[in-house]
Image: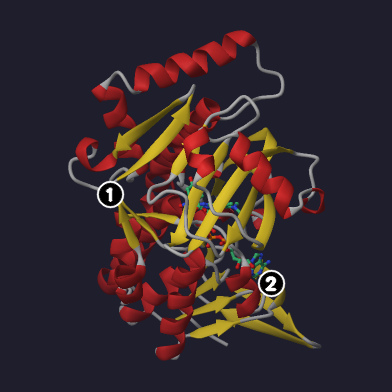
């Protein structure tokens, strides 16, 4: 098989790039290790920035997002007995975010790829990038007993944190920066009315909590848990009780609980791999960088990678201009690190650290008191949360 661009990974990053390139007449193939149902069963992001939404529209996949997604112009931070609101609209110069689930967005991308006869190969086993520093790299994969080779100009590594692409870059070339946090988030999805029309991030001595949503009938809640905890350790009853303990009493009093329809634990990690290019391999999204979910930046950082890569590929194929590809890694990393900084800051501000000193807790309280007493600090939070420009 021959193609121009071979994309490894059929998550949001890979599918969005595939769709954008297709619309520009640039032939591409997506290789995904899992089935479509498996990918759509993963409950992840809920908050999108407008830069991501704009790309979805450009990819002709924004119709349902614009119809069903909710515009949020602010969110709450519960701390020290107070419930302070961050006015995103006011402090970001009129911007906002969109609440629309990653599952739905991925479904829209799959549907579009199908409608346009795009090639998305599921259940591709042993995907292996080859000859990455040659002008004609290839990717092989296995389907049953058969090994298939795809020859291409470029390989895109959009296969998430545990993918194969980043691992195919020699250790002598790749530098990895990592910070692992001593806790995870236990998330529950329930078919109940959300406790608040806007998100509530809560700092509490017992640990962080977050009230989020997917729609007016679908709630998504998280609580900070120790790394050693397993999903089986947490019955629905225990989850709701702990969540309610960490929220202001008036919020807990009006919370509607119900059976969980999904429950999972995600460890929190900050990670960046540099550079994001090796020969004709380009990394994008979680394959190159991970943030703890506290600032809702993960998917939104992938969006800027895809935006830069898409424009670089178009310049290469339409105008024989290689400058976008040459500059990709440096340009993408500059924005990636800003998302890292912001996500780290939100995480440090709102979580309870097992080894923290009383001094550290005083600083968290002071940081929050400063935030809500300073318009400049709220402006800084708002401009990062709605997304820095690409
Ligand atoms: P993905 O989604 O991991 O997709 C990668 C795909 O590659 C496939 N794959 C392979 N395919 C072929 N061969 C191999 N060897 C392969 N290895 C892996 C995988 O099966 C998968 O389908 O990466 P992508 O596309 O870069 O997208 C990144 C986002 O998924 C991620 O950043 C966000 O979900 C992070 N995130 C959030 N981001 C936001 O912007 N806003 C949020 O509100 C938000 N909330 C979250 C989050 C992540 C969370 N978890 C579970 C980590 C909330 C949570 C709880
Ligand atoms: C979510 O709804 O899953 C969500 C929202 C905001 C975050 C993280 C996750 O910061």
Q: Which residue extends farthest top?
A: 359
- Is residue 322 among the parts visible in the rendering? no
User: In the displayed image of the protein, which residue is found farthest to the front?
Assistant: 253
Q: In this view, does 170 lie to the left or right of 318?
A: right
Question: Which residue corresponds to mark 2?
Answer: 127
CB of mark 1 within 8 Å of CB of mark 2?
no
| Dot 2 crowding, Cα within 10 Å, few <14, some 14–19, many 20+ | many
Marking on residue 58: none
Give the total number of marks visible in the rendering.
2
Quadrant assignment, res 215: bottom left
Residue at 57%, 15% in the rendered image: 361
Quarter of the picture containing the N terminus is bottom right
Is the residue 80 above or below the residue 113 in the image?
above
Residue at screen point 60% across, 40% down: 244
Task: Please state the horizontal and vertical placement of residue 75, each as a whole percent of the image.
Answer: 37, 41
Q: Residue at x 23, y 39 (%)?
A: 92
Q: Can you tell me whether the CB of the residue at mark 2 lies under 8 Å from the nearest atom of ligand 1?
A: yes
x, y percent for residue 248? 50, 33
Residue that carries the numbered disc 1 in the rendered image: 96
Vertical relation: 285 (above or below) 242: below
Q: Measuring 40% from the left and 60% from the top, which residue is drawn there?
A: 306
The answer to whether 147 appears left or right of 377 in the picture is right
Q: How crowded is mark 1: few (under 14 residues within 10 Å), some or many (20 or more)?
A: many
Q: Please, what secondary structure does the residue beneath circle 2 have?
A: strand
Q: Earlier in the sequence, mark 1 or mark 2?
A: 1
Quarter of image, res 292: top right
Residue lying farthest to the left in this orientation? 93
* Mark 1 or mark 2, whichever is nearer to me: 1
């Amino acid at each position: 098989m021959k193609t121009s661009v071979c994309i490894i990974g059929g998550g949001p990053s890979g599918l969005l790039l595939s769709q954008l390139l297709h619309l520009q007449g640039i032939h591409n193939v997506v290789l995904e290790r899992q089935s479509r149902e498996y990918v759509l069963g993963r409950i992840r992001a809920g908050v999108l920035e407008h830069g991501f939404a704009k790309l979805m529209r450009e990819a002709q996949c924004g119709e349902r997002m614009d119809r069903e997604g909710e515009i949020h112009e602010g969110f709450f931070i519960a701390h020290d007995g107070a419930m302070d609101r961050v006015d995103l609209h006011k402090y970001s110069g009129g911007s906002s975010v969109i609440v629309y689930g990653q599952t739905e967005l991925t479904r829209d991308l799959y549907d579009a790829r199908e409608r346009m006869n795009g090639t998305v190969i599921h259940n591709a086993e042993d995907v292996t990038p080859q000859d990455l520093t040659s002008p004609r790299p290839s990717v092989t994969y296995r389907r049953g007993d058969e090994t298939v080779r795809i020859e291409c100009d470029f390989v895109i590594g959009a296969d998430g944190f545990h993918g194969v692409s980043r691992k195919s870059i020699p250790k002598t070339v790749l530098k990895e920066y990592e910070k692992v946090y001593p806790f995870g988030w236990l998330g529950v999805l329930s078919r109940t009315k959300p406790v608040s029309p806007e998100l509530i991030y809560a700092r509490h001595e017992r640990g962080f909590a977050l009230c989020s949503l997917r729609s007016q009938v679908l709630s998504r809640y998280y609580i900070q848990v120790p790394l050693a905890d397993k999903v089986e350790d947490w019955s629905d009853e225990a989850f709701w009780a702990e969540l309610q303990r960490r929220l202001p009493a008036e919020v807990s009093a009006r919370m509607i609980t119900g059976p969980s329809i999904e429950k999972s634990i995600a460890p929190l990690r900050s990670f960046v791999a540099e550079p994001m290019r090796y020969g004709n391999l380009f990394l994008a999204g979680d394959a190159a960088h991970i943030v703890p979910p506290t600032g809702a930046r993960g998917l939104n950082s992938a969006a800027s990678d895809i935006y830069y890569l898409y424009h670089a590929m178009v310049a290469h194929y339409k105008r024989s201009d290689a400058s976008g590809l040459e500059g990709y890694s440096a340009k993408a990393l500059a924005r990636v690190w800003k998302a890292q900084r912001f996500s780290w800051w939100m995480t440090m501000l709102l979580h309870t650290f097992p080894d923290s000193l009383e001094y550290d807790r005083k600083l968290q309280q002071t940081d929050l008191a400063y935030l809500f007493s300073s318009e400049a600090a709220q402006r800084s939070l708002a401009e990062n949360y709605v997304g820095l420009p690409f």
